[in-house]
Amino acid sequence: MIEISPYLHVQDIALRVLRDIVPFIKSGNRECSVADVCTQLLKQYGAKDCWYHDVPALVLVGERTTVSVSGTDYQPSDVTIGANDLVTIDLSPMVNGFWGDCARSYIVESGSVRPPEKSSSLYYGIRAERELHVLMKEIATPETRMNELYSLINQSIETMGYKNLDFRGNLGHSIEKRLEDRRYIEANNLTMLGDCNLFTFEPHICRTNDTWGFKMENIYYFENDKATPLGSPQLLEAIS
């Protein structure tokens, strides 16, 4: 088993940024400015590097939330956050070669972020993401193969009336030291989750025929054979 603490350190930095960025997510601010503030906060909190194609913060606003794009092609846009809108943020910090990786979706109502439970319009997407993470934790074991998890979760996504938006079709990947070593939760991958030490689970979904794309990503590891999210409990709770 690998030493968790250096990964916990960088993941907590990402979780803090996802918590502290909320006041900047408001109507009138631009996608690119939110990405800039995320990057500034990551550096301020100690993560001066990133591991994903020089994109520390992949921010999408409005209908762009359904866009699935590689970091090699991503450019933050000048799209402005509306009074009632959706913003997704995916962070990829790195400290001393150790990766963090997490994403959240933010519902904007009347110009500012509302707690999902109090949102009247887009809570359904947040709820679906939460349900998928609960389901993954229920069915994943160290012996579960990536293709098995992929199949079961994709079936659930379709049953819930959603579609998988990921441009590669996957639902997550192993945490590694080099990008090219990542193993994906995808069809035909027989790797067992327990062989990965750490892996992400990150469904990018939207309702069929809808224009809003939702993300929720955590890093997981197995503790007593149970998939456990990486992060300090209070930070995970703050952005749940």
Image (spheres, rainbow, N blue to C red):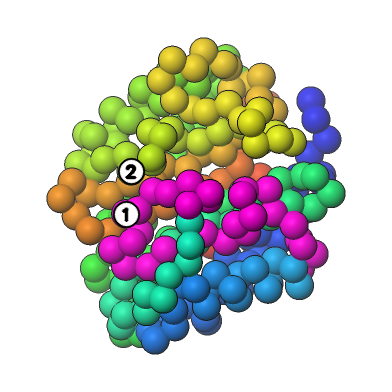
Side (left or right) of 125 relative to 228: left
Depicted 96 relative to depicted 187: above or below: below
Task: Determine which residue is flagged by label 2.
Answer: 165
Q: Position of residue 179 (x, y in %)?
A: 65, 36
Number of marks drawn: 2
Based on the picture, tell me whether residue 47 belongs to the magenta stretch.
yes
Per the image, label 1 sits on a secondary structure element best described as helix
Q: CA distance from mark 2 to mark 1?
A: 7 Å
Left or right of 63 on screen, residue 187? right
Q: Quadrant of residue 162?
A: top left
**Viewer-side residue, 115 vs 23:** 23
The quarter in which the N terminus is drawn is top right
Q: Which mark is residue 166?
A: none
The image quadrant of residue 161 is top left
Q: Is residue 30 above or below residue 77?
A: below
Q: Residues within 10 Å of mark 1 (few under 14, many from 20)?
A: many
Which residue appears at 80% of the width and 30% of the height? 2
User: Label 1 amino acid?
Assistant: Thr
Within-10-Å neighbours for mark 2: few <14, some 14–19, many 20+: many
Q: Which stretch is magenta?
A: 45-73
Query: Tag 2, which secondary structure?
Result: loop
Q: Which residue is mark 1?
A: 66
**56 falls in the magenta region:** yes
Locate residue 73, reporting x and y percent: 48, 52
Asked if the residues shown at circle 2 and circle 1 are in contact, with their CB atoms under 8 angstroms apart, the answer is yes
Left/right placement of residue 68 relative to residue 93 reads: left
